[in-house]
Amino acid sequence: QVQLVESGGGLVKPGGSLRLSCQASGFTFPPFYMSWVRQAPGKGPEWISYIGADYGTNYADSVKGRFTISRDNARNSLYLQMNSLRVEDTGLYYCVRENYGHGDFWGQGTLVTVSS
Amino acid sequence: VLTQSPGTLSLSPGERATFSCRASQTVSTTHFAWYQQKPGQAPRLLMHGASTRATGVPDRFSASGSGTDFTLTISGLQPEDFAIYYCQQYADSVWTFGQGTVVDMK
């Protein structure tokens, strides 16, 4: 069955960096697009980035220039490098398999807390 | 922008739940979806292509809509259906979510 397991979250000070990882299994990783979606405490989901199997990417305006999404198709892995973190980046970060513009499988999330 | 209404729906088990999602611009039905989220869990895909149930979703869930107005209906609420429901669209290479409708027990 499809499994997406995120890791790499934690507590970081404003201005700091973190790298999130997502290990995918149970499906053929390429050709699926993969996304990161985050959810601040008590708020709805917010899409932040996707990457295609051809490594094409897009970002939400809120993270453009600070976050970088990447993938390793040989390792069935997805990554999110987060730099210049802000308090408002706090939340649960989900790895999501994309299928025609919607997320058909979601991981359980990894928590990122940005606080001084 | 996707605007969901109502914000909260208080109903009893067995009742019918209907709630809506309105888009600020015309949405492709191919790229419109609904999700269910329970406390402590990730969102779960319910409907895609505006009206197609995802794998394993019971047939008491149905959805319709086109253009800017979309509706999700649960006919006969079960205890496990009390949750938050989000709509989502994909357009211009960006995903957008609505703010959610909470379905809670009266």
Image (tube, rainbow, N blue to C red):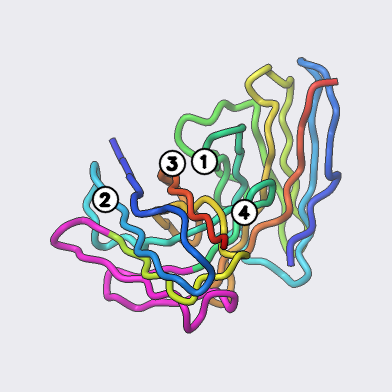
| Same-subunit check for callouts 4 and 1 | no
Q: CA distance from mark 4 to mark 2?
A: 22 Å
Per the model, the C-alpha gap separating discs 3 and 1 is: 6 Å
Q: Nearer the viewer, residue B10 or B71?
A: B10
Q: Chain of mark 2?
A: A
User: Are the numbered discs 3 and 1 placed on the same chain, yes or no?
Assistant: no
Q: Circle 1 is placed at which residue position? A: B42
Q: Hey, what amino acid is under mark 3?
A: Gln
Which residue in the protein does label 4 denote? A40
Q: Earlier in the sequence, mark 4 or mark 3?
A: 4
Q: Which residues are magenta?
A: A49-77
> Residue A9 location, x and y as percent?
41, 53
The Cα atoms of the two marked residues, 2 and 3, are separated by 12 Å
Q: Nearer the viewer, residue A49 or A6?
A: A6
Q: Residue at x 32, y 60 (%)?
A: A32
- Residue A108 circle label: 3
Foreground of the two, B36 or B60: B36
Labels 3 & 1 near each other (Cβ < 8 A): yes
Q: State which quarter of the image contains the C terminus of chain A.
A: bottom right
